[in-house]
Amino acid sequence: MNAAVLVQSLVGHTALVLGVGLFVIAAIGLLRFGDAYSRLAATTKSGTLGVCLVLLGVLVLEPTWAHAVILLVAIALQLVTAPVGGFALGRAAFRSDAPMPAGTAYDELHEHVERERRSTEDGESRVPAGEQE
Amino acid sequence: MIVNPALLDALLVVLALTLLPAAWRGATGPTEADRAIGADHAFFVFVAVVALLALRTDRYEILDVVVVATLVGFLSAVTLARYISRSRR
């Protein structure tokens, strides 16, 4: 085994182990964190980077052009879509009134969401009232 | 052969074990958002498992599954988000 192959093997396996380690961190965060937003942060951040590191490790260990195209496209898609999906989930959690962490002092967005919700309810109730007149 | 099969097996077992907290969070999560987050994590683990299995079994056709799974994972996250917030958007 010459030196280049040894370095390639070492780098590839290190990337795989780091990626799986991030998944373990995400799982611990999923178990230990106390509110939905922290759990979402743990899952999305380490999930995104973990998937990218695992795919990079596979690419380093098996470097052909066909695999490079597939894996780089997958990495790019993961880097673009996973944070957006996590943001959508966090927004949905806030809109469905998931409890905030215990130390939260200011929640200005909540008032805004409430006002928006009330105005849309008024808008819906105004239509039947107008029909009654 | 530069790939270490024993290490890959160990990594696959560890990935399978990280599915347990996701399943627990999906079963007992206090809010619906927690259940969706567990599903999201399970999908990330699925993508990584497919990539590792391609390396472990030398069948690189299933790397195509990784690309498709990334897109389906995004769609599932957005769909679950719409479901959680109901009609409120």
Image (cartoon, rainbow, N blue to C red):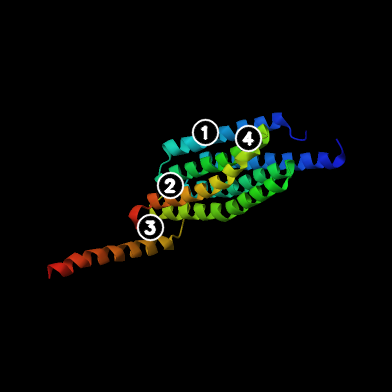
- What is the three-letter code of the residue carrying label 2? Ala
- What is the three-letter code of the residue carrying label 4? Leu
| Mark 4–mark 1 CB contact (< 8 Å) | no
* Residue indicated by mark 3: B89
* Residue indicated by mark 1: B20
* Residue indicated by mark 2: B33
* Residue indicated by mark 4: B53
Chain under disc 1: B
Q: Nearer the viewer, residue B85 or B47?
A: B47
Element carrying mark 4: helix
**Which of the two discs, 3 and 2, labels the residue nearer the N terminus?**
2
**From mark 3 to mark 2, how far is it between C-alphas?**
14 Å
- What is the three-letter code of the residue carrying label 1? Leu
**From mark 4 to mark 1, how far is it between C-alphas?**
19 Å
Task: Residue at 44% x, 42% y: name it.
Answer: B35
**From mark 3 to mark 4, how far is it between C-alphas?**
38 Å
Q: Quadrant of the C terminus of chain B?
A: bottom left
| Mark 2–mark 4 CB contact (< 8 Å) | no
